[in-house]
Image: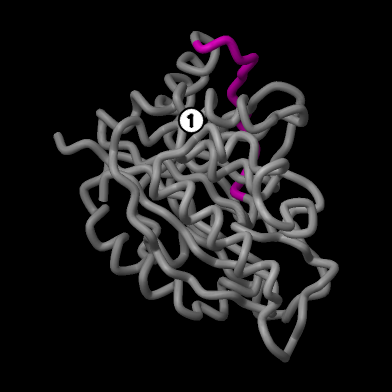
Amino acid sequence: MLRAPALFISHGAPTFALEPGLLGPRLTDIGEGLAHATAIVVVSPHWQTGGIRVTGAAMPGTIHDFGGFPPALYTLTYPSPGSPGLACETASLLIDAGFVAIVDPERGYDHGAWVPLRHLRPEADVPVIQVSMPHNLDTAGALRLGKALAPLRDRGVVIVGSGSLTHNLYEVRRSGENAAYASDFAAWSRKAVLEGNTDALRDYRRLAPSAIRAHPTEEHYLPLLVAAGAAGEDAPTVIDGGITYGVLSMDSYGWGL
């Protein structure tokens, strides 16, 4: 069995489900190569818990965990099957790595999971489980979380960290030029990823330009560290996504593609 890739996908705003932009078609192209994946494991910032929870339902529902967006968004679903067995195995891996983890038999997919997956695997034909982020997760913990999930890749399980390369919603612009700070932060992150400089990524809040402005809170950047932690020695590939709404970098990355 071929080793499955690890991905960091910028999901930006929920409207990405309706507005694929540059990134959506590129994810679909990548997803065409994942038809034989045994499952997909997604870590999203929109499910934060005490400890870690893993979706264990056989058919998780679609959660519309946002408000004030176009009505069409609330009609979308992602009817991928779950995998209770894989959920138990994943929880065991996390426990072995020192995390507190349990299986949640009722939780569905939040938009941080289903929005990018609608582009990556629009057929919803690969089993998906979602792994929550602990409330107290930091960059070092995110790398450790990714490393704990990495063995699943050898069984054909794709690891997806879903976040946003920049995520300052206070500055979202419906029109106008892209903000220079978002481009600068994205360029710094790209250099660190391509160089495999996980030390820099771990210390991005001190080292990266405009880090606090790009991420007033950390939760949307941490999935990049999860994916990098799951990557092992695999070389990174840039998945260009451009910038939406002037400030949301949609750049994404793959390892082992």
**In percent of the image, x 45 and y 47: which residue is there?**
193
Residue at 39% across, 45% down: 195
Instruction: Left or right? Give the position of 33 relative to 109.
Output: left
In the rendered structure, which amino acid carries the disc numbered 1? Gly
Q: Nearer the viewer, residue 230 or 115?
A: 230
The residue at which mark 1 appears reads as 146
The relative height of residue 211 versus residue 230 in the rendered view (above or below) is below
From the viewer's perspective, is residue 97 above or below residue 172? Answer: above
Verify whether residue 105 appears in magenta: yes
Q: Residue furthest left?
A: 1
Residue interval drawn in magenta: 97-109
| Residue drawn where x is 35% and y is 30% of the image | 232
Residue 95, by quadrant, is: top right
Say if residue 74 shows up in the picture.
no
Image position of 35 with respect to 179: above or below: above
Residue 141 location (% of width, % of height): 62, 25
x and y, in percent, of residue 123 in the image: 36, 64
